[in-house]
Amino acid sequence: MSIRSVSTRPQFTAKSSPASEIVASPSCAVLNFSNLQRGPSRSGNSSIRLCMGSADGGFGRNPHGVGDGDGVIIVDHGSRRKESNLMLNEFVSMFRERTGYPIVEAAHMELAEPSIRDAFSSCVEQGANRVVVSPFFLSPGRHWNQVAQLTIHIDGDIPSLTAEAAKEHPGVSYIVTAPLGLHHLLVDVLNDRINHCISHVAGDAEECAVCAGTNKCQLH
């Protein structure tokens, strides 16, 4: 059916939507449809919001968020298992591509390289004058709760390790953010993982990236 064959032509107007009303994208417009005939003797008004994608993958730039002079370090606990450490590298690559942040580094708290100290130095070398350290942990624990100490223990925590790394770079500020915690988007992540594994057991999906080659996702 061509557009000309439609007997009722909706009339619409577009108006700009203030950036303060837009959460994920600064470029949006609201299209208001008036006198749209939906059926015999029926009419009504409706509107839709159209948003343009941004170069940073849809993440609008918060004026108080990550800026061009910031470096981001995503740090996990670290493992003696090489595959686990490589998975953090893959996540960091995904994060960098999705957000468009220019300086993003991976770090392991212990047991593997690069360390927080290495990642901090790498951020500074790339031009960061503020470093944001984000624990890739589900919930707060002693590795995040401990206050920064002047000395580091063998099982040092993230704040103290970051403080020690920052000593080598006077004038560079830093912040250790909260872990993932009870974020509502984690509900979607967990639900997606559950349904994928159930689909795999049913023979309708391949093993996910976590289980690939392990044959661990089975119904017992």
Image (cartoon, rainbow, N blue to C red):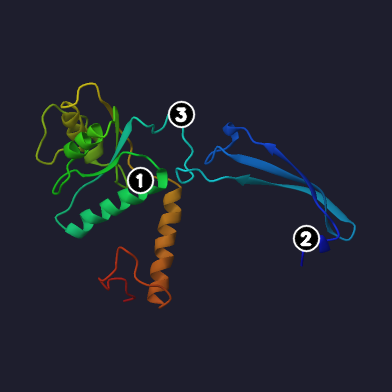
220 vs 5, left or right, is left
Give the image quarter of residue 96: top left
Amino acid under disc 2: Ile
How crowded is the residue under tag 2: few (<14 C-alpha within 10 Å), some, or many (20+)? few
In the image, residue 118 lies at what x, y percent?
Answer: 17, 39
In the image, residue 84 lies at what x, y percent?
Answer: 22, 57
Q: Residue at x 32, y 52 (%)?
A: 91
SS at badge 2: helix
Q: Residue at x 17, y 58 (%)?
A: 82
- Which of the labelled discs sits on residue 3, or is there none? 2
Quarter in which the C terminus is drawn? bottom left
187 vs 43, left or right, is left
51, 209: nearer the viewer: 51
- Which of the labelled discs sits on residue 63, or is there none? 3
SS at badge 1: helix
Q: Of marks 1 and 3, which one's residue comes earlier in the chain? A: 3
The residue labelled by disc 1 is 96
- Is the residue under label 2 in contact with that under label 3 (CB below 8 Å)? no
Amino acid under disc 3: Pro
